[in-house]
Amino acid sequence: MRLEIPKTFPGATPPPMTALDATQAGLPLAAEVVRVLLLEDSPADAFLIQETFSECPGNFKITHVDRLSSALEFITHNEVDVALCDLGLPDATGLEAARSLRTAAPDVALIVMTRNDDEDTAAEALRHGAQDYLVKGQLSNNSILRSLRFAMKRQKTQVDTERIRAQQIQLKDEFLSNVSHELRSPLAAMHQFAKILEDEIPGKLNIEQQQYTGIILRNARQLESMIDDLLEVTRIQAGKLTVEPQCISLQDAVSDTIKSYLPAAKSKGILMCAELGGEMPLAYADPTRVRQILENLVTNAIKFTPEGGAVWIRAGINQQDTTMLTLEVSDTGCGIAAEGLQKIFERLYQEPDQERASRKGLGLGLYICRELVTRQGGQIWVESRRGKGSTFYFTVPVYSLHDLIAPVILNQKQPPQSLALITSKLSLRGSRKPSEEACRKVRRTLERCMLPDLDVLLPRIHSAGTEEMYFAVALAKEEGIQVLVRRMQDQLDLLDEIKCGAVTATVSYTMLDHVQIEQFTSGERLAQWVSTEVGQLVNAAAFARSYSNE
Amino acid sequence: MSKKIMIIDDDPDMRLGLHIRLKANNFQTVFAADALSAVSEARKHQPDLIILDLGLPAGDGFVVMERFRANVYLAATPVIVVSARDRVANEQRAIKAGARAFLQKPVDNDQLLATINQLLETA
């Protein structure tokens, strides 16, 4: 890149900066040192820029580096006020330099330097966090000084605003979390005593008393779910919403939802049915979250559907994209006006004329649904006609063994010679299911035993039985696998639940046929074969388990 | 003989509510209303299981669990935390502090009883 200094400056030349301008712009001038990091690979350009600086009034301490790597190294270990960054470096392409500097030092003012004919890149750099840009060939001590001053001022304002915003968010989060705690305590007592009455612990209730107790409980539950929504939104905004995808059957999620909402639908005179698309593959999603989304949609559907109407839940493979499964909840309710269809998933949005529903709610449910769906890799949308009803759709990814296994196999320089499927079985004494906490601990323990680029721990297979199984594919010869299996067993034996004898854990393995493996020359075909083989083994194990549970 | 459960909660309504529920399921109950008396009362009554609220006067549930763990007579007694505080922020912390389960208020009675029975069975 060559720097030419034209005799006359093209474009509007800024008027010379006076000392008064400088103080107004808030730049420490003669009194303080401005620390400048100059990232420029061309020695000639760097020289010219430094020359220009030396003609500027003010005290500059310039550090010149010619590689992005050295700039990043410098900026993380030294105090810098402003970075001047060239966009044509040998170790970074275009905007990458600007982006990396911005990430490494979010508080430093950043100015990019572009060639005469590349204002588009400059504009793009501004979008990526640069405060200003300078066009090479149009540099003068005035323009540099002015740019520096404003970049630093702007950066300071930005950092301050960001800090204040972060403080406010934290305050709000703490407030909401406190409020919901304070609201929950009296609610807990109300709920407890209404439940004591309902269960007739103090004595028999007559029909009317039963009915009223039911009303108290229903309202307490509604209040509880609103408090939960408030907390969930706080979590979304703090980036603390957790989603733990695993291998689940959507049939279960749908039938559980139907089961728990059937009484409510019945009492309102609404028909409620499910339609499941025959042979449906398993989904890769968080079962609790899928249920939460369904419950939210079904609650709305029942709320807005008049007596004699119907609510349907359907599930099946997505016709457009077969790697996704679609769930839908449709109703014969009042429908949504066209203007509302887009806005309905926004936070706090409420349909303007909801006179049909006696209570409006907080306007958070669908927003939470959208966040939960997108965080699991799906989409949510709605189709509706005023007066006819609405259908809400959301998608979750199909569980694909191949997608999980292929990256590890393809990553190897040469195809592996042998590999195995390791099965860890967790069974509880008695007929109860292992607790979520125990399952999570086991997963974490197994994860610790594995090498990230040689072993794959498959997602948890959602089960309702008294046994929990974990599967892992490991790339190693038989001796290596034996070592791994022993390590897993030893680590699992250290868990409290296993030490006290409440849970038994056993680890076993199956070698996949290595004669077969040798036949594959392409990694992709091998990955395909492995996922089919593993799939069969996993299914066989899961089938044996569900059979033994019955 | 029926098992003895200690309820540590500063809210008298919560204590009474849990007492009625537990009594109906053939448990004996004893109480404490603050972090200070929790340990001495527990030493006196030697409960089989403890239901503990997190927000307590004179300390909090975490302080109480720490004292239980330091006490040779109470260290092995299973503790169920029943709190109105946010599950996400407190469950892991409570388990680390020695609780065997975390239940969110308003507590689901079936879940509470199932947890109690499970812990008493394995104890």
Image (cartoon, coloured by chain):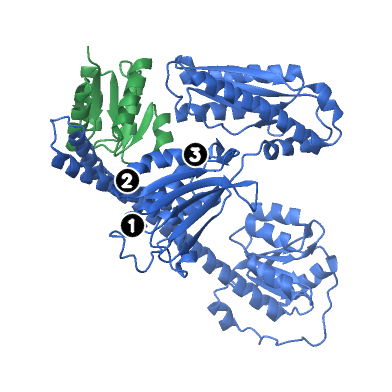
Chain colours: A blue, B green
Q: Nearer the viewer, residue A252 or A448?
A: A252
Of labels 1 and 3, the one closer to you: 1
Upstream in the sequence, badge 2 or badge 1?
2
Location of the N terminus of chain A (image quadrant): bottom right
Residue at the (84%, 33%) spot, across then down: A414
The residue most toward the front is A308
- Asked if marks 1 and 3 touch (Cβ < 8 Å), the reply is no
- Residue A119 pos. (x, y %): 73, 75
Q: What residue type is labelled 2?
A: Lys
Specify whether residue B86 is in view: no
Q: What residue type is labelled 1?
A: Pro
Element under disc 1: loop
- Asked if marks 2 and 3 touch (Cβ < 8 Å), the reply is no
- Residue A545 pos. (x, y %): 55, 21
Neighbour class for label 1 at 10 Å: few (<14), some, many (≥20)?
Answer: some
Q: Which chain carries label 2?
A: A
Q: How far apart are marks 2 and 1 (CA)?
A: 12 Å
Specify whether residue A176 is in view: yes
- Residue A418 pos. (x, y %): 78, 24
Mark 3 lies on residue: A287
Q: Distance between the residues labelled 1 and 3?
A: 30 Å
- Residue A372 pos. (x, y %): 50, 49
Q: Which chain carries label 3?
A: A
Q: Which of B32 and A536 is in front in this view?
A: A536
Residue A470: mark: none
Choose top left, top right, bottom left or bottom right for residue A31: bottom right
Please tell me whether residue A42 is drawn above or below residue A141 in the rendered image: above
> Left or right of A271: which side holds A283?
right
Mark 2 lies on residue: A266
Q: Distance between the residues labelled 2 and 3?
A: 26 Å
Residue A306: mark: 1
Neighbour class for label 3 at 10 Å: few (<14), some, many (≥20)?
Answer: many
